[in-house]
Amino acid sequence: MRGAGDALLSTEIPLPKSGVVVHPSVCWTNGVEVERAPQSAHAAASDRVPIGQVLSGRYRIERQLGEGGMGLVYLVRDEQVVGETFAVKVLKQGLDPEALRLLREEVRKTRKLSHPNIVDVHSVNVDGTALYVLMEYLEGKSLNALLDEEYGRGMPFSHAWPIIEDVGAALGYAHDHNVVHSDLKPANLLVTTSGRTKLLDFGIARVSRGPLLHKRSGPRALTPAYASCEMLQGREAHPRDDVYSFACVIYEMLCGERPFGERTALEAREASARVPPLGVLSRAQNELLSKALAFDREARVASVEQLLAGLAPDKGPRGRQHAALGVTVATVAALSVTYLAVDKPWIAERSVEVQPVAADAGQAASYTATAFAPPPHSVAVLPFVNMSGGKEQEYFSDGLTEELLNSLSRIDELQVAARTSSFYFKGKDVDLPTIAHKLNVASVLEGSVRRSGNRIRVTAQLNNAATGFHLWSQTYDRDLSDVLQLQTDLANAVATALKVTLLGDVAAKIERGGTRNPAAFDAYVRGSKAYWTSPGGQQYEQAVIAGFTEAIRLDPDYALAYADRSLALSSFAQDAKGAAVLDYFNKARADARKSIALAPDLAEGHLALADLLQMSLDFTAAATEYERASTLAPGNARVLRDYGAFAVSMGKTAVGLAAARRSVVLDPLNPETHYWLGASQALARRYDESTASFTNAKALSSNDPFIAPIIDAWLGLNDYMTGNFTNARRTCGSADGYLSLICLAMTYDKLGQRTDAETILVKLQALRGDNGALAYAMICAQWGDKDKALEWLDRATRLHDPWLQYVRVSALFDPLREEPRFQAIERKLKFPGGADPNPS
C-alpha cells in the first residue's frame, strides 16, 4: 500500500534489486528505491553534471546514483583526501540569494546533529551555476524497501523494535537541538548493512516546503500519508508533528498498512476515523500509539521519548521475543551510582578478568538470546597466541590483539565484540560455536604472533562461527614500525571476507592517535596490559603509568597513549585521598586535552575529557564530549556504557538506555556493562529490568566476595523503591557496606523501626563525615525531614560533590522537588535541557 498516497508530492519507484538506488538526500545500494519526481518534472539534460567533472576543484563526479524531485544525486571522489567518497545532490532549480542563505542556515543547523542515527549533511556549495549539497555516502536498504520486499504484512515486533529505538533516538536528539524533521516516512529511514538505522533528509526538506526555490513548481518535500493535520494546513512545524509521522511509520512497520489507509490525516479527521488496534501490541501500547496519532497537536503524545517508553518491549504481550536484527540493540539512587564509585569502584576499568558465569553452558546462557541469529557482519577477535617464547612476551600478543580489535571496531558497518568478552575465553578450551553463541557473532578471528626484535610474523584466520569453515587466512611478515599498516591490512581483509563495504578512509581511522615508533608501541602495550589485568595497588598503578608515560616520551604525538593515561589517572583518583585526588584529576585533564589537540577525531580523548567534565559538574560540556565520542566510536562498548549512564542521569532516558543496552550487546560477558545497565535502568525507574541486569552482573562476577554485597545492596534499593520493604531489609545486605547502610537507614524507617534507622545514620556519618552529605540528604528526604534534607543537599553543593549529577532524576529526591530551595539548587547545577518530561 506504499506509493499511491505519496504520488501527489513524492513518487517512489522501486528499482530492480541488483540496481544502484538513491534517496534524494543520500544514496546507497543493494536494492533501495529511488525517490523521483513525476516524469514531467525530470531534469533536462542541461541539469545534469558530466561524469568526470570536478566540483569546486575537489569533488570528481564518478557516476550518477539517481534522481529526486529536487535534484540529481552523484557519487563523488574527494581529490584531496585519498579514498574518501561522498554523495552530492545537485539541485535542479537555482536559488535566489536569500533562499541560498536560508538553505545554508538549514544545513548549518543540521550539521549540529552529530548523532549515530542521523546521516551527515556536510555543506551547501556553489560551483558556477551548479548548487549542490555534500552528504555522507552509505550502503543499506530503506525501510520502505524492507516493507515492500520482505515484510509486506508487517514486521515481527522483535525486528521492528531496534529500528524504532534508533529512529526515536535520532528524533529525540534533533528535538533537543530545536530541529524538527517534518518529513518522516519509511523512504527516509535507512537500515544500513550493519543493521543500524539512519534518519535522512534533514534540512533540505524544510527549504523546499517554503517559497524558497526560485520559480519553483512541482513536488514539494511533504508526504501527505505521513503528515499531521497541522503540517497539511501549512502551520509551523512542531516536534509533535514528528511524533505523528513516527507513529504512522511504526504502525505501518507492524502491520504493513497505514493507520488510516489511503486517507490523509485531514480526510481521516473529517470522516471521524479511528485507529484499528494491532494484535501484536498490548492494550496499553495500542492506546499510546493511538494517542500519538491524535489529529490535534495538543492531544498528541508530548515527546518521542514518551512514545518509546510506552512501546518498550517489556510493555508488550507476554512471550514476545525481544531480540532483533542483531543491532539493538536511582530509583536507584543518585547515590547508588555515586558512592559506589567514590567508595571503591567494585570493578575498576583495570580489573576485568571475568570469572565463569556458571558451571555449565546452559546456566551461563541465562542472559543471552535463546535463538542464535547473529548479525551477519559481526566478529569476535580472540586473543592471538603468543609464539615468541616465554610468558613474558604475552603482553605483546595481547596488546596487538587489542589494537586489531579496536581497529575493526572503527569500521562503522561491522559489529565487534568488546575486549573483555573476547578475552573471557583466553586459556579456556571452548569450541568456536560456543564462543559465537555467547558473544552473538557470526564469525571469529583467531591467530598467532611471533616476534623477533622489531620483526613480527602474524598469522590470522577468520572462521564462520556456525559452520566452522575458514573464510580467509593470511600470514604477514612485517617490521614493527609498520604495525599501523598491519592493522589496516588485517581490518581490510576481514571486512572484505565479511562482505562489508568500507566507508571513508579506514586507514585514516585506524591511524588516528597511533604511533609508528616501535619502542613507543611496545611501551604502550605494556601499560595497557597492566591496566587490564593487574590486581591493583601502588605497584600496579606505577606499572600502568610508567608504560603510558614511556610511550609518550618516545613519541610525544602519541594521542592514544595520552587518552589512556588520562582514563587510568581518573580511575586511580577514585581510590586516592586528600591532595592526591586533585593531583590525579589535574594530570588526567591535561592528558585528555592533549589527546584531543593531537587527534581531534580520536574518540578515547573525548571520552576521557567527558568523564572528567562529568565529575567536575560541567554537565553541558560533558554532554558535548560524550556525544562526540559516541559519534566517533559507535561500536565502542565503553564509550556507549559511559555515555548511556550519563545520558540517563541527565534525564535522557531513551537515548541513555539505548546506549547502555548496546554496550551489553557488544560486551555481553563483561559484568561491568551489565552492572551499569542495571544502574541506568534503576535510575530510570525500571526496577524489574534493573534487577535482571544486576543478577546477570552477579552471575558473571561469580559471586565475588567484594562485588556481591554491593550488587545485593542495589537489589535492596530496587526492593525499597518498589515498596517491598520486608524483602529490602534482607537484600540490603550487612550493616558494614556503605551502600548497604544507606539502604538500611531508609528501609528501617519504612518498617517503623526509626531508632534502628537513626542508629544506622549515625554509623554512616561516623564513616563518611561531611563527604556523605548527599547520602544524608537522600535519607532525610525519604524520612520526610525536608528541612534537614535540604541542609545536607546544600552542604553537598558547597562541597562540589561530584555525584550531584544524579539529583535531577533520582527518585529518592522526589519528596523535595516542589521545594523552592531544591529548585534553586537544580538551577545552580545548570543541567542541560532536553530531559524527558516523565522519567518513568
Image (spheres, rainbow, N blue to C red):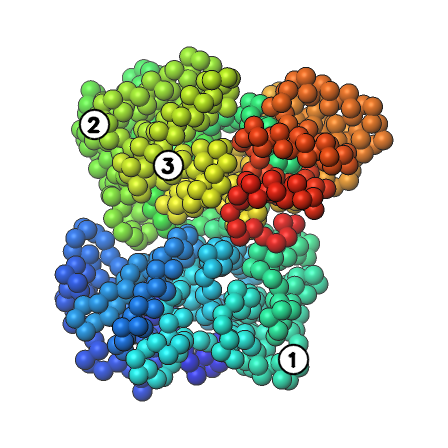
Relative to 667, residue 117 above or below? below
Mark 2 belongs to which amino acid? Asn
| Neighbours of disc 2 within 10 Å: few (<14), some (14-19), many (20+) | some
Residue that sits furthest to the right in the current view:
752
Q: Nearer the viewer, residue 690 or 114?
A: 114
Helix, strand or loop at label 3? It is: helix
Q: Position of residue 410 (x, y in %)?
A: 34, 43
Distance from the alpha carbon under mark 1 to that under mark 2: 70 Å
Distance from the alpha carbon under mark 3 to that under mark 1: 52 Å
- Residue position for label 3: 604
Task: Name which of mark 2 and mark 3 comes first in the sequence.
Answer: 2
| Residue at image coords 14%, 67% | 53
| Neighbours of disc 1 within 10 Å: few (<14), some (14-19), many (20+) | few
Q: Position of residue 481 (x, y in %)?
A: 19, 29
Q: Quadrant of residue 41?
A: bottom left
Tag of residue 273: 1
Q: Nearer the viewer, residue 495 or 646?
A: 646
Q: Is residue 539 left or right of residue 819?
A: left
Q: Position of residue 378 (x, y in %)?
A: 41, 46
Distance from the alpha carbon under mark 2 to that under mark 3: 20 Å
Tag of residue 517: 2
| Residue at image coords 45%, 22% | 582
Check contact, mark 3 vs mark 1: CB within 8 A: no
Helix, strand or loop at label 2? It is: loop
| Residue at image coords 55%, 40% | 829
